[in-house]
Image: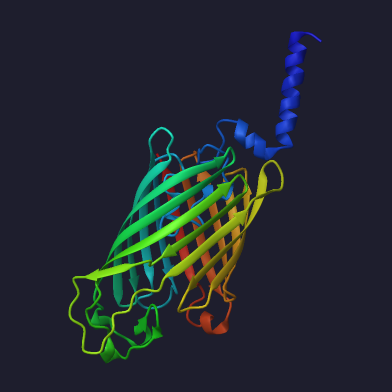
Amino acid sequence: MNLKSQRVFFNLCFSISLAFNPVHARELISGSDSLVSDNFTTNRLLDFPVLTNLATNPAMAGRSGHHSINSNYNAQWLNQVNNPKEFFISYDVALGKKKVFSLGGTYSNRSFYLQKLQSFELITAFKISTGRSSSFRLGAGISYNHKSDPDRNYSTYSNMIDPRYGYVYANSEIPFKTYEKYINLKANAWFESKQFFSGLTVTNIHQKYFGTQEAPPGFILEQLPVTYHLTAGYEIPLSGVLSTTPALQIEKTKTMDAAITPSLFFIYREKYMIGFAYSNLNSASFSAAVNLFKKYSLAVRSDFPLKEELKQLSQVRYAEVALRILI
């Protein structure tokens, strides 16, 4: 066998090995459609702006290895007056040659019924490589929060609802001006390998209130409840171009039962994603996303209530659109 024949034979064997080992192929082929370039092949689901962002997982800051801009807009109970809405935008970047330390910042503007909450957060993250195919990340965030007063001009029966305690106010009992400014802390740990990922976030670790007006006698200013948020998933390759990732999210506070959301995602050619979820036994959701030009990722999601009493409020419980840009 001459030299030219040997090269042809070697290239043929190499191509066949990659076709039957898609995970290894993603490691070796440069120019992959994956948006993220880390020291190892990452879980493909995390290349899309679903499941995680800096608000829920600050340790994800700098994960892409690029300057990353993420924006999100969501709304709940779409046909309700003064329904909850939120706009969120973040920026993060990994620093240094090894990119083990990252910085990020977020801004969110949330309106819920008669109140508005603006938050500015500074985020730091540190990456620890645990092997050629895995990494462990630690993250923390400190936020400044400003809650505005209710607007009494828009007080109606349907919106006398406190976001934490449910229906508690009559029209004459709208909350007075109090605890309008506070500092809040969160921490997060994140582990990721080629196929498995898991993260635990603790929010509302501590609040420091300031700049408030005096509360009426007998009023006790309550701290926001500490909240634990767990995310985990495992990618299962189905072929060289198709994979599926079952995932699970659990959120728990001291004052509420755990909210459990199992989900299943399908990814085609690292560019297209569709997902289905069943949230807390009362709603189902559908999500879809696309990666474009190795720099842009767009995702949409809608939740639909399953219980009749919730359907009477709205046929769409939650709608969201998210955009990620890498520079």
Does 200 sit above or below residue 242?
Answer: below
Q: Residue at x 35, y 52 (%)?
A: 123
- Does 202 sit left or right of 179 as displayed? right
Q: Nearer the viewer, residue 256 or 4?
A: 256
| Residue at the top extreme of this rendering | 2
Measured as percent of width and height from the top left, residue 166 is found at: 41, 83
Q: How many marks?
A: 0
Residue 63 in sight from this viewpoint = no
- Does 295 sit left or right of 243 as displayed? left
Q: Nearer the viewer, residue 64 or 283?
A: 64
Does 147 sit above or below residue 241?
Answer: below
Measured as percent of width and height from the top left, residue 311 is found at: 53, 80
Residue 121 in sight from this viewpoint = yes
Q: Residue at x 36, y 88 (%)?
A: 168
**Which quarter of the rendering shows the C terminus?**
top left
Measured as percent of width and height from the top left, residue 297 is found at: 48, 47
Q: Residue at x 60, y 75 (%)?
A: 281
Measured as percent of width and height from the top left, residue 6 is found at: 76, 14
- Does 224 sit left or right of 232 as displayed? left
Q: Residue at x 41, y 32 (%)?
A: 97
Does 19 sit above or below residue 246?
Answer: above
**Which quarter of the rendering shows the N terminus?**
top right
